[in-house]
Image (spheres, rainbow, N blue to C red):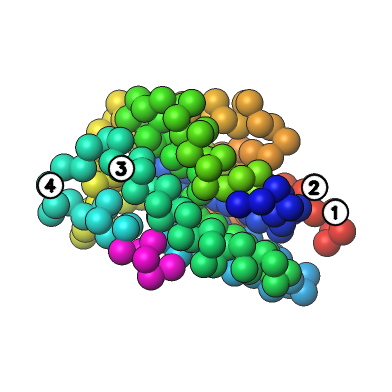
Amino acid sequence: MPSAMSHLGRRFITVEGIEGVGKSTNMAFIGAWLEERGQRVTVTREPGGTPGAEAIRRLVLDTGRDQIPDQSELLLMFAARAAHLQTLIVPALEAGDFVLCDRFTDASYAYQGYGRGLSLESIATLETLVQGDLRPQLTILLDGSFELSVARRAGRTETDRFEREQLAFFERVRSGYLAIAAEQPGRVKRVGAEQSLADVQRNIALVLTASYPEFS
């Protein structure tokens, strides 16, 4: 992907965090915040977002399939991401939309890198290969404990391969997310997910206003 695409990241927002921290609810809040300010918003998710990428999502998350080797899981994530970028994300950004994505490449670092123990350098190589220099302008990290995740997922009737992982895995994933936030404080903004929803959304609004002062 050519470097000329890098300017498109200005309107690219991602939301990250482990399962059960409120990403779906707060994605809706962010989308509404932007739309109230006259912006068109394309909402999507990873893995997925396009028919081909959604097929890969089903393959990766399906608990009924044979165990997928860790490296295969990583490569499938980036295969889905390549299709997602070329088919949906980049065209939407080029059309002037904001793109709001439930997880993106930070999840690969957190889940496959820190969680599975795969090489961060290999993930960085794949990131450059698939994305060029396109990166999100803003990433909101909804940070919550494993206990919060378990409590909020208690009513779900079905769980995927990741949701069935245990405490140690999610602690590694969470520590990975926090390491990314510490390394890239200009882009990644941590919001504590264990606050009340009103407080979470108040803090998200503060982050959005600081990142996009032209909409304040």
Q: Identify the residue shown where x is 28% and y is 41%.
A: 72
Q: Which mark is residue 66?
A: 4
Q: Residues within 10 Å of mark 3 (few under 14, many from 20)?
A: some
Horizontal arrangement in the rendering, residue 204 relative to residue 51 (left or right)? right
| Range shown magenta | 50-55
> Which residue is under mark 2?
210
Give residue 188's mark: none
Disc 1: which residue: 213
N-terminal of the pair, mark 3 or mark 2, is 3
CA gap, disc 1 and disc 2: 6 Å
| Circle 2 residues within 10 Å: few <14, some 14–19, many ≥20 | few
| Label 1 close to label 2 by CB (< 8 Å) | yes
Q: CA distance from mark 3 to mark 2?
A: 36 Å
Magenta segment includes 204: no
- According to the picture, the residue beneath numbered tag 3 turns out to be 73
Q: What amino acid is at disc 3?
A: Glu
Q: Residues within 10 Å of mark 1 (few under 14, many from 20)?
A: few
Residue 190: x and y in percent read: 61, 38
Bin the neighbour count of mark 4 within 10 Å (Cα to Cα): few under 14, some 14-19, many 20 and up.
few
Instruction: Give the residue type at disc 2.
Output: Ala
Q: Secondary structure at mark 3?
A: helix
Residue that appears at 53% across and 42% down: 129
